[in-house]
Amino acid sequence: MPVISRHFRRLGVRRRVKEEGPIRHHTWKWAAACVAAAGAVGWFLYAQLAARGFDWRLAGRSFVGLRWGWLLLSLVPIGGTYGVRALRWAVFLKPLKARPSLRNLLSATLIGFTAITLFGRPGEFVRPYLIALKEEVPATSQFAAWLLERVFDLLMALLVFAFALTRVEASGVLVGSKFAWVLAVGGTIVGVTAFGVLVLLLSFRHLAEPLQRRLVVFLRFLPEARFLKMERLSKAFVQGVESTRSDGALLAVFLYSVLEWALIAACYWCLAQSFSGLFALALVDVLTFMGFVSFGSAIQIPGIGGGIQVVAAVVLTEIFGVRLEVATAFALLTWILTFVAVVPVGLALALKEGLDWHSLRRIGREVAT
C-alpha cells in the first residue's frame, strides 16, 4: 500500500491507518448493496419479460447460434478504441509535457474504464487522476483535459445521433408510442446540445485565460494560503485546456475522435455479423443503432450497466423489427463488449501498479467530492 499512500498525499487527502477497518466494512456493505440491486433488477426484468411471453429458449438459442469468429473479431476494434483515446489524451498533454508516455496513458485509460464499469460514473475520475500522477502534471489540468474529451465525445455522439434520426425519418418506419417521442424531440435535442458544445469549445479557446485572471483578482479577499491554492488550481485548469488554442491540436483531436467512433462502429458491425443467422443489419443500420445507443451508454449503474442494454433492445425491436428475445441477447453482448471486456485487463494492470479494489473505489470517491 505505500504506492497508494503516496498517491493520496499528492492529492492532499489524509488517510489514517485506523480508517482502514471502517473502509473495508463499508466496502462489504457497498458490495452487498450492488448484489442486492442486481438481484432486484434481474427479478424485475424477469417478471416484466415473463409477463410479455418472453421465450427464454429462443433467447438461449440466440447465443448458441452465434458466429463466434465474428464475435471474437469484434474485440479487436473495441480494444483499439482505448489506444486511440490514449493518443488523443497525448494531444491534451502536449502544452504541459512535450513527450508524454503512451504506455502510461494507455495503462491509465484501461484502468479508468475498468473503474467506470465497477463503480459507475464516479470511476470517471480515476483516469485523469492516474494520468496526473504518472506524467507528473497538476491533477486539475487533467480534469480539464477529461472535460475536453467529454466535449468531443459528445460532439461525435450528436453527429451520429443526427444521422440516426435522419435515417429513421427517411425510411418512414413506423415505431411504437414509447419510442415516438424520441424522434419527435430528437432534432431539438441535437440542435440545442450542439450549440452548447460549440459555445463551450469557443469559451475554452478564447476566454479561459481572461476568466482565470479575473477570478484571481476577485479572490484577493481570501487568506493568502487559500488564495495561492485557488490561483494554482485555476492556472492548472487553463493549462489543461491549452490545446484548444492550437488549430493543429484541435484537428488532431477531432480526427482521433472520428477514428475512435469508426472503431466502435466496426465493433458493432462485427457483432451484427455474429447474429447474421437470426437477423441482418447493414453498415448504415449499424450506424443508426450506434446513434441511439451512444446516449444510452451515459447511464451506468455500478457493476450492472444500465441504459445501453435497454436502449439497444428498444432500438432493435422498434426500428428493425427484431424479436425481443434476440434483441435482448444482442443488447447484452453490446454492453459486455463496450464496458465489461476491458475489466480483466484493467484489473491486471491495476494490481501490477499496486492498486486494488479499495484504492480504486477510494480514488473515485475522494476526487469526486
Image: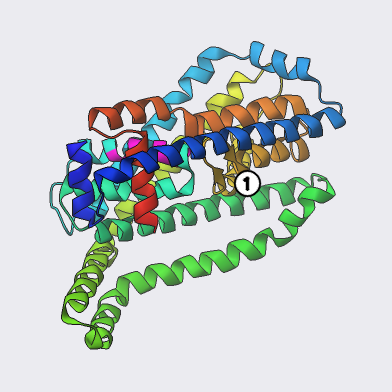
The magenta stretch is 108-117
The residue that label 1 is drawn on is 292
User: Which image quarter holds the N terminus?
Assistant: top left
**Where residue 40 appears, x then y in whole percent?**
68, 35
**Where residue 277 appears, x then y in whole percent?**
68, 16
Using the image as rendered, state which of residue 47 and residue 143 is in the foreground: 47
Badge 1 marks a residue whose secondary structure is helix
**Where residue 211 appears, x then y in whole percent?**
30, 80
Using the image as rendered, state which of residue 178 and residue 359 is in the foreground: 359
The residue positioned 23% from the left and 55% from the top of the image is 11
Crowding at mark 1 (Cα within 10 Å: few <14, some 14-19, many 20+): many
Majority SS type along the magenta span: helix
Using the image as rendered, state which of residue 159 and residue 347 is in the foreground: 347
The residue positioned 47% from the left and 37% from the top of the image is 117
The residue positioned 76% from the left and 29% from the top of the image is 46
Residue 175 appears in the figure: yes
Q: How is the image coloured?
A: rainbow
Q: Amino acid at mark 1?
A: Phe
Residue 112 highlighted magenta (yes or no) = yes
When the figure is inspected, residue 309 is found, relative to residue 19, above or below; the finding is above
